[in-house]
Image (spheres, rainbow, N blue to C red):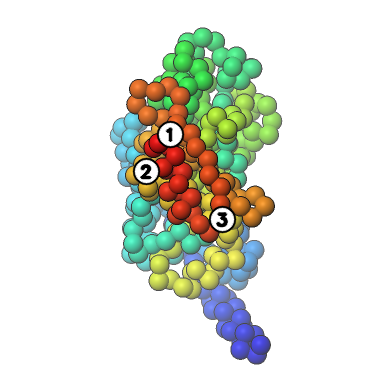
Amino acid sequence: MRYRRSQTAATEQIMKTRKVVLGTRGSELARAQTRLVEKAIRSAYPNVTIKTKVIATKGDKARALDPHAGRKGLFTAEIERALLAGDVDIAVHSAKDLPSETSPGAEIAAVLPRASMNDVLVSKHPGGLASLPRGATVATSSVRRKHQLLWKRADLNVVDLRGNVPTRLRKLGEHEWTAIVLARAGLERLSLSPIRTEISFEGRRFVLEILPHEIFLPAGGQGIIALQVRADDQSTKTIINLVNDRETLLCLRAEREFLRGLQCDCNCPVGVLAKIDNGKMKMRAQLFVQGAVAPRQGEVEGAPDDRERLAAELLNRLRA
């Protein structure tokens, strides 16, 4: 008991003198997510000095030159390299942007509690997806969302959409589009709350419909803020351990294990969601294959710590 008290006292003394550098992209959403991480760490360790370093990624640079850029890893690789080089201590990522395989020297050691995993239809017209005019143009950056939209509304004209959340909302107002699809979590973190049925952005009014995740199954990791650290950095792991949401981390690892087995990231039309309820993990997946309008779907259930078996079983069901 005396040893534990002295160990705790020593840890607290280290935290009083410790400086932590957070690495993030420069978008409004990325900064907002980093502020949530900073707030969580300060709540656990009020005396830790926290600084934020904004890192320009290939994705940010590529989009400035090519609006169609957007492959997975483009928005995380530079931040991961800065982490491994020791320029930052914690890399803050949107979990769905991370490739299913990351660098051996880095690991996702903690996550904040998952926000909503739903997608949202942001439209110029009321009534939601079912009420969109025949042949309406809907814009999205996601291959998964494109397939899901056409699965339910084959008449839609689905076009590509790039840029951060404010840019996408701005484009909706400027173009002859009927609607766009965004992640609910991103809107909420930018205080554009989809709890209401509409939002106002730069003088324009848009109507919101939260799309059911039973049909619009989300991307792996959607709604999760991931904290990546160097694998051998025990001091930083100690800091983020107290802000980690264990159930969310278990679900993220299961979803990433499934994507790893599928060898598929955000360029594939796949959705996967793991949830823990009453001590059991339920995993659902949806995969669109070439030549089929409707997806292959599957669901498995088991122990939360048995993610590798669950992911493999789910993968086998979809392949069958």
Percent across and percent down for residue 308 are 45, 54
Q: Is residue 2 above or below residue 149?
A: below
Which of the marked residues, 3 or 2, is nearer the chain's N terminus? 2
Please give left or right for residue 36 compared with residue 262 in the image.
Answer: right
Label drawn at residue 168? none
CA gap, disc 3 and disc 2? 21 Å
Residue denoted by label 2: 262
Please give left or right for residue 39 compared with residue 64 in the image.
Answer: right
Q: Identify the secondary structure beneath mark 2.
A: helix
Name the residue located 61 percent from the left edge and 69 percent from the top edge: 45
Label drawn at residue 287? 1
Please give left or right for residue 67 compared with residue 258 in the image.
Answer: left
Q: Quadrant of the C terminus?
A: top left
Q: Identify the secondary structure beneath mark 3.
A: loop
**In the current view of this chain or complex, which residue is farthest to the right?**
196
Q: Which label lies toward us, 1 or 3?
A: 3
Name the residue located 56 percent from the left edge and 14 percent from the top edge: 132
- Can residue 32 be seen from the camera position used here? no
Which of the marked residues, 1 or 3, is nearer the chain's N terminus? 1
CA gap, disc 1 and disc 3? 23 Å
Dividing the picture into quadrants, the one containing residue 213 is top right
Is the residue marked by circle 1 packed among few (<14), some (14-19), or many (20+) residues within 10 Å? many
CB-based contact (under 8 Å), mark 1 and mark 3: no
Percent across and percent down for residue 18 are 51, 73
Q: Quadrant of the N terminus?
A: bottom right
Residue type, mark 3 in image = Ala
Percent across and percent down for residue 93 are 46, 51
Q: Identify the secondary structure beneath mark 1.
A: strand
CB-based contact (under 8 Å), mark 2 and mark 1: yes
Name the residue located 61 percent from the left edge and 20 percent from the top edge: 128
Percent across and percent down for residue 28 are 50, 43
Residue type, mark 2 in image = Leu
